[in-house]
Amino acid sequence: MEYDPNNIFAKILRGEIPCRKIYEDEHALAFEDIAPAAPVHVLVVPKGEFVSFDDFTAHAPASLQLGFFSAMRKVAQQLHLPQNGYRIIGNHGADAGQLVPHFHMHILGGKPLGGLLAK
Ligand code: AMP
């Protein structure tokens, strides 16, 4: 799939749409999900034009991949999640229900999260 620069996370990265920012560095932006599925629900978005996990891991420079995953760790640390635990989720494509075609990962926590998948 070709990258659509008008997707909502691209607009957030360009500052055209506001977000509730949690963390930002040269590689990634993290902000609260607008429809939280847990007490803590943060999206981490790399600063680059990648549609999906597959696209990102195949085509992003190694420095950006490392920076992105380091940013995820920093977000979890900043939110004091490691002690009680947290979940990271990445949706790729239709079967996973990916809504926004800019690669992102979800960080969820703040309560026991239950089973992995909804029945
Ligand atoms: P998915 O693409 O299925 O991995 O999930 C996209 C997520 O983006 C959903 O959890 C939405 O609630 C969230 N979302 C959509 N628009 C915004 C926005 N403007 N700000 C924050 N989160 C958003």
Image (cartoon, rainbow, N blue to C red):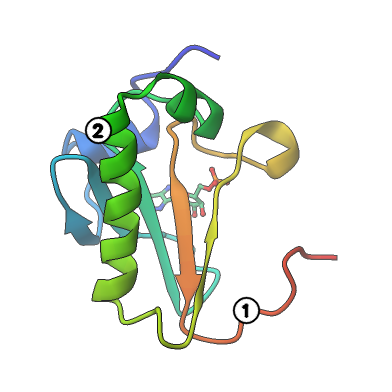
Question: Residue at (78%, 65%) from the top-left corner?
Answer: 118
Q: Where is residue 49 in the image (x, y as percent from the top left)?
A: 34, 23
Q: Can you give x and y, in whole percent of width and height, for residue 101 in the image? A: 49, 30
Mark 1 or mark 2, whichever is nearer to me: 2
Q: Which part of the image, by quadrant, shows the N terminus?
A: top right
Q: Is residue 102 above or below residue 111?
A: above
Secondary element under disc 2, as helix, strand or loop, is helix
Q: Which of marks 1 and 2 is nearer the N terminus?
A: 2
- The image quadrant where one finds the C terminus is bottom right
> What residue is shown at x 53% (from left), y 86% (from top)?
111
Residue for point 43% across, 43% down: 104
Q: Residue 71 appears at what percent x and percent y? A: 27, 54
Going by the picture, which residue comes out furthest to the top?
A: 2
Any mark on residue 63, and which?
2
Question: Helix, strand or loop at disc 1?
Answer: loop
Q: In the image, what residue occupies the spot 24% across and 61% down?
A: 20
Q: What residue type is labelled 1?
A: Leu
